[in-house]
Amino acid sequence: MPVELIDTGGWGIYTTEEGRFDDAGKDLRSLRKDIEHQIAQAMERADLVLFLIDAQAGLMPLDQTVADLLRRRNLLDRVVVVANKTDSDSWEAHAFEAATLGLGEPICFSAHNGYGATQLNDRIWRGLQHVEILDQRDEEMKLAIVGKRNAGKSTLINALAGEERVIVSEIAGTTRDSIDVRFEIKDRSFLAIDTAGLRKRKSFAGDIDYYAYHRMLQSIRRAEVVLFLVDATEPISKVDQKLGQELQRQFKPTVIVVNKWDQVGDGTKPEDFLEYLTRQLRGLDFAPIVMISALENKGLEDVVAMAFNLYEQSGHREPTGRINTVVDTILRKRGPSSRLGTQAKLLFASQVDVRPPTIALVVNRPQLFRGRYERYLMNRLREELPYSEVPIRLIFSKRKRIDLQELKEGKNRSE
């Protein structure tokens, strides 16, 4: 049975490993109202609430505060107390101090070494037996939202949801982890992955930034389409360019989303800005560009429609005959040049995979096709095949000849 797990912020804990202030000097306590609002929303919507306490640290005043909150909201029937850091049976006596909260007997558990995991899993399934299982869609687009800090990723998620699903703050780096939000729009579903904002490596503020960066890269790998947010009010930065290169490296269908377009002066024309983006984000000239204002809810339908468009393009498969005809025609018009006068020949071409569309080409000299001619060939393929706005992966290989000795060895093995 699929389960949606909601990880909330810590109640009353509004600091990083560096302290109460972030690296820009802003007070993290300003996040308190938003964090506590989201915790309250998660508790109200959940079918089961896991209330974690620290068995080794013992009960704290904030633990009692959370317990009182659960009572006031009449949620006791769905609460399971989990005494984390019960790393062995020697800690169980400390864990059972949580029974004094009046929320039932705690489950002894250790996230570090898995102690008590079976008991916890059994308790979770028993607590969810009454929940109606919804029909799961066979196919669901995974959509990652990436960009540098404060580009408006979380604002976009909230605008699509029509409510505050993720915290939006002027404090850079409020989103430290990847957050999944499921949407259904016009009978189509997709999973939006809100990622941590990218920043220069030398600006990382401790381990949290380091791991947030790598989780962002993992989210890109998970995604089938990526919304690449850029801030229309700021110049394209090295961070933006680095992220654009990463999307190319992973062959991800990308929608370049220009956010905060409503804040750009009247003197800036859209066509001029599009030309500017093409120059600054080299290698993504095929990616569609959509101007939006997440704060004003403008352009959101166009973004979602374009994302599904790229999803369809990248999942399309062309017949082998069509692939061979198109590639052969391109080579006849302009084939790769060789200083030695070697003529490039196509022996066979076929699409071998989707997302990204992957075309394998068996040729006489693979080295003739790599580099500049490979880019030329991909551009021509986008013009001729239904992949005009998505990356294409080309695999060049040389036909392997089997000599007489190999044939004899194969015959002897078969006998």
Image: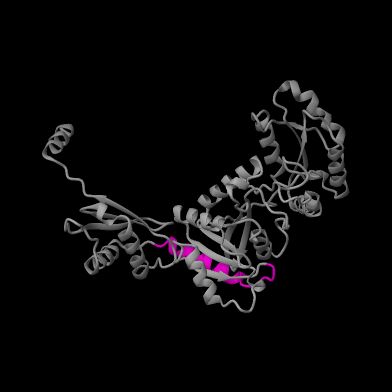
Counting every numbered tag in the picture gives 0
Q: For the point 72% across and 30% down, which residue is it? A: 85
Q: Quadrant of residue 150?
A: bottom right
Q: Residue 183 appears in which quarter of the rendering?
A: bottom right
Is 69 on the left or on the right of 360, as rendered? right
Residue 143: in sight, yes or no? Answer: no
Quadrant placement of the C terminus: top left
Colouring mode (rainbow / by chain / secondary structure / one colour) = one colour
Q: Is residue 74 above or below residue 103?
A: below
Magenta stretch, overall SS: helix
Give percent across and percent down for residue 191: 59, 57
- Please tell me whether residue 311 belongs to the stretch shown in magenta: yes
Looking at the image, residue 286 lies above or below residue 14: below
Q: Locate residue 349, reporting x and y percent.
A: 27, 58
Q: In this view, does 236 lie to the left or right of 105?
A: left
Q: Nearer the viewer, residue 57 or 55?
A: 57
268 within the magenta span: no
The structure residue drawn at horizontal position 70% and vertical position 52%, both measured from the top left corner, is: 174
Q: Where is residue 209 in the image (x, y as percent from the top left)?
A: 64, 45
Q: Give the range drawn in magenta.
A: 295-316
Work out which residue is located at the far top of the displayed protein and give it.
90
Q: In this view, does 260 lie to the left or right of 47?
A: left
The answer, for residue 268, to whether it is visible in the render is yes
Image coordinates for residue 213, horizontal then vertical, percent: 59, 47
| Front in this rendered view, residue 112 or 43 | 112
Residue at the spot x=57%, y=45% of the render?
Answer: 214
